[in-house]
Amino acid sequence: MINGIAPPERPADTTSHQHLKPLSGAECLVKLLLEWGTKTLFAYPGTSELALCESVLHTDGIRIVNARGDGEAVLLAGGANIAGQDIAACLVHGARGATNAIGTIADLRRNEVPLIVIVGLPSSTSAKFLPPHAEPDLIAGLGHFAKSTLELPGAPLGQDGGRDFISALRSARSEALRRPCGPVLIGIPTDTLGRRWLDAENWPAPAATITDDGDNEQELRTAASWLSSALRAMVLLDDYALHYEGSHQALLDFARTFELPMMQVRYDRGPMLFQTLSATANPYFVTRYDPANSRHREALAQADLLVTIEDRNMYPRVVGPLASERHIAVTSAPGKAAINGYLRPGDIVVPGDIVDSLDRLVKYADSPAKRPGQAARRRWADTVRKMCAGGTTPPPARRQLAATIAAHLDTLSAPVLVDDSQIFGGLLAESYDLLPERLRVYGDHGGFVGAGLATALGAALANSQWDVVCCVGDSALVNGFKAWFSGIEQRVNLTCLVCNNGGSVSLRKQAVGDYGPDALLFSADLLRNIAAVKYGDLCGALGVPYWHATWTTGAAEEAEQLAAALAAAGRTDGLATVEIQVPGSLEFWEGLWRVQGFDELPDR
């Protein structure tokens, strides 16, 4: 077993004459991809990568898909792996291809998606002359945007070098899967791919995988002691914690054991729609924490212990100050929690797999008989629920729009929503309680406007059992439009839901907030749609079925029109697009998109 994935008993031959001659570097790499369970290689190749493409085409059990773009190759593969699995890899050309894709690689790193990114390099003999697809220290430089890198030497490697080659590649793949996950760049010279240097019978067996999350036993026992003695403890978690297998049950068991009210980080700027806990599935979940809400702040201020879980963005601009007597940070990325500034000397950081850590905290908890004050903890949990009950109700037109979309998602067997919108995502987030319990939501913490379509297409292509819907804003559709070419070619089933509000409402709101109602940016073309571009015409030119719906007040006829369009799109084989024409007025979107971070507000 390698990271929980068993290699095939008999990997397919990469050439019909493999038993007569040594394996090439390309054939070794394909054999490794099969060993890892890779089903799809998304590629936008150049000359350096053709040997690998040829080997994949000769191999059963793995397919190669032309991504029709460098960044698209990364995002399609990232979409395939978005749930944390490792079923796709991607291939891009050296220098221009890899540098073209670097923003998408950084986006996957921020969203902690595991991915092997293979970068074809010039032959080792010509690299020093800097041919057009080479740059000095290319892989090392690009590595600042990835989780880690590996640059393999040029051929010939020989038998011993070949075994080292295999070992290094296995280690790189393990690094991509180690939490926090992320993309790993592997640079391979074309001569290493093309030459033969490893006899098949000398193929090294995979070493046993040893999971090393560090020694956190003492931190866990001390944290369990703190939790057992605290009477007003509270949990604040980030959505990163919700995508791990077993995390929902672990969170419920943890909250039940210590009677812990739970809140979740709420995002009011940039991307705002992310997977959120459900109070139905977890009765200890209270609300998304809103620092602008005095009752939320008061509940947090009364806590004698704050437990943060998978903190990635709990810094003052997002959540305001996190005042509490003591803190416990349960995290797979201690460094990311530390930079947010709320941890003080003496606080506890529990590193490692958070599902395992939560399970062990429950295991180490004092028995109820030795845990005085359990009744007081229950009263505290009830008090927090009452303090945070209610809240602002969205305007009826927005609420009804979210309800209509939610009703459609509820008709799908395995609904998955990939969000590449900002203020439209905020509209859905404010009515998250209407969304189906079984819905999986994937937002974008990297804020890469235009990444959603390729991500959603990769998710749908690699996970045929999913019913994928992608929400995009105007800018996201224009920026990500290129991904449609690969999606059309592969006949991917996907509904693209476009919110057309005439331009970037969020930035127009920001301009007014920054420069006042007379801001020239408010009415400038800079933040408006291109008038000549009609989404229906684009879809028609590509043969993509298209429906249009208008939404102004949420009247019954508008809801019926949109519901019918969504239903028709959902029955379509392949790509389908539904455009919702919504008001662009700031009044319609009032209350969404905070123009100031909580670090900019005056002290209360």
Image (spheres, rainbow, N blue to C red):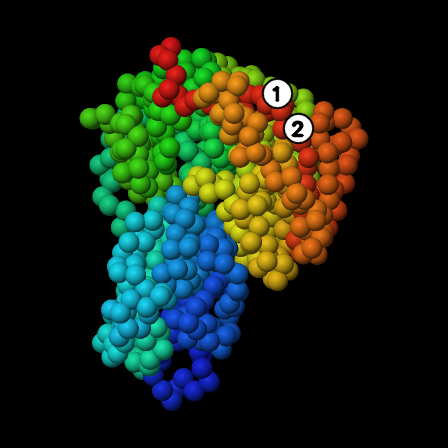
Q: Which residue is mark 2?
A: 583
Identify the image quadrant of the N terminus: bottom left
Question: How many numbered dots are placed on residues in this image?
Answer: 2
- Residue 400 vs 101, above or below: the answer is above
Residue lying at the far bottom of the rendered structure: 20
Asked whether residue 276 is in view, the answer is no
Label 2: state its secondary structure: loop
Please give left or right for residue 298 compared with residue 205 in the image: right
Q: Position of residue 198 (x, y in %)?
A: 30, 79
Q: Which residue is mark 1?
A: 587
Residue under the image location 20 percent in, 26 percent down: 346
Residue under the image location 53 percent in, 52 percent down: 454
- Residue 554 vs 300, above or below: the answer is below
Amino acid carrying label 1: it is Glu
Between 580 and 12, the residue placed more toward the observer is 580
Please give left or right for residue 252 compared with residue 493 in the image: left
Q: Position of residue 457 (x, y in %)?
A: 56, 53
Q: Position of residue 543 (x, y in %)?
A: 70, 56
